[in-house]
Image (cartoon, grey):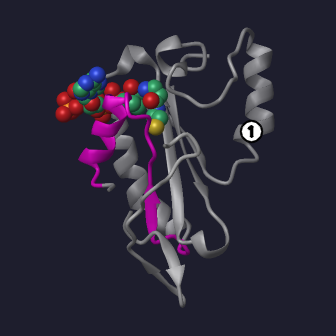
Amino acid sequence: MEWFTDDNVNKFCSRDTTFISKEDAMQYIADVVIPHPWYRAICLNDKPIGSIYVSSFHGSHICRGEIRYEISSKYLGKGIATKAVKMVGSTIFVDWPHLARLEGVVAVDNIGSQRVLEKTGCVLRKYYHVKGKPIDIAMFSLLSTDQ
Ligand SMILES: CC(C)(COP(=O)(O)OP(=O)(O)OC[C@H]1O[C@@H](n2cnc3c(N)ncnc32)[C@H](O)[C@@H]1OP(=O)(O)O)[C@@H](O)C(=O)NCCC(=O)NCCS
């Protein structure tokens, strides 16, 4: 409830879930958090104040994991997200040895989150497997709306 009901957090999150009641939260924990392959609470003095999780890709992208995180806005700007991302960086490659790269994608207007990832050294290295090895790539894009 601490961060899922926080509009300052929700505005940057892709999920549409907002909780009204404790039952909503319990249902989300049962349906999403517990079955998730790698989902953790971010705790301060044993109190959960945020969450952090990693999802893995499949096929030729198996070497990549995507990290996401959120923290109650009461605790922002104290370096907590940066520390949590670093802690995940030091454990995820042990927990999931198939990963060569942990990455984060961030909305262009989410400057705080970009700063967190900059500080932890994430920049498209080791992006996909070619002949059994993760290689670095450059990415370009053309959109349906481009002239
Ligand atoms: C992004 C988020 C996790 C940051 O948490 P946090 O604990 O405040 O992060 P940290 O304190 O470790 O670092 C934040 C950095 O961004 C900077 N920052 C924050 N907002 C900023 C802004 N609007 N403009 C410039 N810098 C900003 C802080 O100054 C700090 O940098 P510094 O240490 O060099 O001073 C938190 O704001 C959040 O939960 N946001 C909503 C969910 C979200 O965006 N999740 C990520 C989706 S990709």
Q: Position of residue 137 (x, y in %)?
A: 40, 71
Q: Residue at 68% across / 24% down in the picture?
A: 16
Q: Is residue 72 left or right of residue 32?
A: left
Quarter residue 107 falls in: top left
Above or below, comparing residue 52 to residue 142 in the picture: above
Q: Is residue 71 left or right of residue 19?
A: left
Q: Nearer the viewer, residue 69 or 21?
A: 69
Residue annotated with mark 1 = 32
Q: Position of residue 133 (x, y in %)?
A: 48, 85
Q: Residue at 74% across / 14% down in the picture?
A: 22
Quarter residue 79 falls in: top left
Q: Nearer the viewer, residue 68 or 114?
A: 114
| Amino acid on which the number 1 mark rests in the picture | Val
The answer to whether any part of residue 8 appears in the image is: yes
Q: Position of residue 56 (x, y in %)?
A: 61, 60
Let me know if residue 59 is in the magenta part: no
> Which quadrant, please, contains the N terminus?
top right
The answer to whether any part of residue 78 appears in the image is: no
Give, as a single range, the part of the protein colored magenta. Answer: 97-121
Let me know if residue 109 is in the magenta part: yes
Above or below, comparing residue 90 to residue 7 in the picture: below
Above or below, comparing residue 128 to residue 51 in the picture: below
Q: Residue at 50% across / 43% down in the picture?
A: 146
Q: Which residue appears farthest toward the left when viewing the image?
A: 119
Q: Which residue appears farthest toward the top when viewing the image?
A: 20
Q: Is residue 97 left or right of residue 30?
A: left
Q: Residue at 38% across / 34% down in the picture?
A: 108
Q: Which residue appears farthest toward the bottom when viewing the image?
A: 131
